[in-house]
Amino acid sequence: MRCVTSHASTRALTDLANLPLPSSADDFERRALELFHAQRAAVPAYAAWSAHELGLRGVMATEVTTWHEMPALPIAAFKTLDVRADGVPTTALWESSGTTSTDRSSHALGSTARYDEALDAGVAAALVPDVVARDRPPLACVQLQPPASGAPHSSLSHMYDRIRTGPWCVDAGAYVDAAYRVDALGAWETLDRCAQSGDPVLLLTTSFALAMLLEAAGEAGWPALALPDGSRVVDTGGYKGRTRELTRDELLARVERQLGVPATWCENEYGMSELSSQAWLGTIAAAAGHALITDAPGARWTPPFLRVRVVDPITLAEVADGDTGLLVFHDLANVWSCAAVRSEDLGVRRGGGFELLGRAPGATLKGCSLRLEDIGNVEPARG
Amino acid sequence: MDRRIGHAEAMTSFVDERDAILDALERILRTWHEHESFDHAVTETVSRTGYAAADVAAQLRHVAVRCRAEVLRELLVDEHDGVEPDPADLPSTVLVLASGGVPGLVIEGIASALAVGATALVRPSRDETILHHLLGGLRAWEPALADRIEVVGTGGVDVPWNRAEAAVVFGSNETIARVRELLPAAASRRVAGYGSRQGIAVLAAGADIDASWAERLADDVLTFRQRGCMSPSWIFVVGDDATADELVSAIGRELALGRTRHLAPGVEDHIAQRRSSDADVLGAIAAGMAVDSTAFHTGDARVTVVRVPTIDALGTHVAHLGSLLQTAVVATGIEDRPRIAEILLDSGCTRVCLPGDAHWPDPRWPQDGIGRIAPLLG
């Protein structure tokens, strides 16, 4: 289906990208509608998909009046189609991990300004509210993720770099190289120095790298650290050890035992390269005395410009409170591609929010396919 | 003379030792189902894959049949022009790589390695659910056999590519190509690589000579949630509209009915249905066309139906799948089978079978037409 875009459409999108992100429910509704129409006009992939989905419902685009009704692009589209606004130069390109080009999704941004604005809002509220409120000085920030210079297409590297080098932190280094090898000794020595000097730490990491660091420390027999009060850990992703998957509770127990950081000061970031905003548990904020307000107990906190629906996989209708379904994001910071994205992650509806369960099961490969990542290894930690 | 006698003795010694190992493998596989670890293997597989327990157990019994000592010895000779190969020409180590998506597939790779008298260097894939249960008791049951199977490349250690003198790989074409790059040059020329494949089915008038053809074909599609390469993904329906409609209706009905037979209890397949539907539409958008083909989505399974006017036109349609062709399930009247089988084999299929047999190839079938042993001989 061919869709005609125009310079006017792209200009409308650019204008929206320059407005401040919404901060209230009314603002959200209004902006969501503006973005829906602008992206339909400027992003051919979204135009085609929304035409298909609205066609199935027998609804005209002009009859869409609320964000709940907006068609959401399946996340697989970022692998299959070029989801970007016509005529907008690409300033940043986020790519998800994947062994082959067909496994990897691409998300092109006309500017990282909106992404950074969304990130800052989330980090200020969820990770460092006490530093923002000047209750404590900037934190020593240790990063277990390649810096953006080594992983230019990783949205996570961009995110963590921005936090680590920003006004709320003192840069204490990144200890994963471009090949995703963990410098366990270097990281541990830095953390130990912070423990000795009494400088609270913000450890930014993937769950995988964190597990690798703790396993390396355990195998090497390095004494457990007692990081100072106010130290906090942020992880994201799955919890694989070298030989088996860890549960989150197991990982947090190791963090407390080996780093001296209790679970109450451990946060989990939930985001994806196809979006611009993140969702948070709210644990650090609560521990720091700046609790976040969520829609319901158990729900993740999202900034005011990110809303999440939980939908039935077959009907795509919203499920009842307490039921499980696929997560659909309406991220108004996702200006350059598509604000409404249907993920392959499962969650439980909690009021107007959600509790994350994890990736929906089921293989996407056919045949006796052995993927390279199935036989790949992570480099052993140095030291 | 002494040298010839020495060589003959060495040959005899090699053959005796190899046969003893193959006999041990046969013993263990034939009796494994009596052990608790067999049940554990099935349970773990069911838990992680959602496959039906009966399918997993049946597959493991079939692997035992395919790995019988007599079969492997026959293959070794048959695939070497009818004579025993000289041990000096055989690899002493064979790297075995296989997905866990088809239960027990890695055991077949190990069997090929043992058949050439080599030590199997096995790197289990992350989705492997069978092997560790088998190996757990192996040292106690068959220590000599245990000595010939070495698990490598785990615990953060790299795969020892340089130790491999040959390799058996069940994987994607990309994976096989990459493995060839990683192996030493001599070993890269001895790779039994079984790559990406798709199964097909051909329906024509007279299929109902077997009243249960549609149910059996549905079983072929749905076993292992269509993850095996032998599960038909395409159904070519030959005949006029009336014939085709009847055949398509029958298989559509059985696919819907058969879904739960091949799923573990409690497995949710709504997600898979949504994925399949999304993939169709996204693919159509990417190709710039409207979605316009008959397709069945049953749980995880997707089957595309292609109408073919006559048997003579079948080859042209099937040939579109090119090197992906492997197994073809044929549900037709008896009189059409020879002609259809000839067309399919000429088109590149390496195996033709009746409904219900897709996943149970004859042990002597030269896998993908490549051979189970021949590639390891160089």
Image (tube, helix red, strand yellow):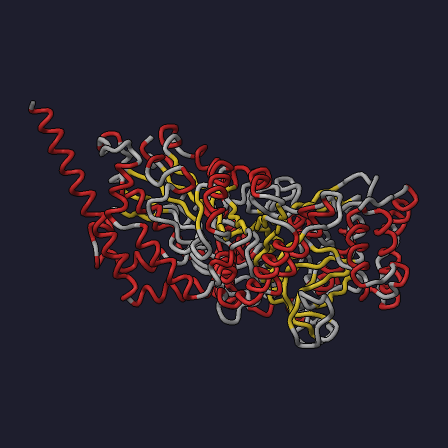
Work out which quarter of the rendered image holds the C terminus of chain B and state it.
top left
* Residue projecting furthest to the front: B335
- One can see residue B65 in this view: yes
Q: Is residue B113 left or right of residue A306?
A: left
Query: Which of the 4 quarters of the picture holds residue A191?
Result: bottom right
> What is the x, y in percent for residue A105?
66, 47
Label total for image? 0
Where B125 sits versus A319, above or below? above
**Residue drawn 72% across and 50% down?**
B292
> What is the x, y in percent for residue B109?
35, 46
**Residue drawn 61% across and 51% down?**
B304
Q: Is residue A67 left or right of residue A131?
A: right
Q: Tell which of A262 and A119 is nearer to you.
A: A119
> What is the x, y in percent for residue A82?
73, 44
* Residue projecting furthest to the top: B1
**Residue drawn 92% across and 44% down?**
A8
Where B297 sits versus A1, above or below? below
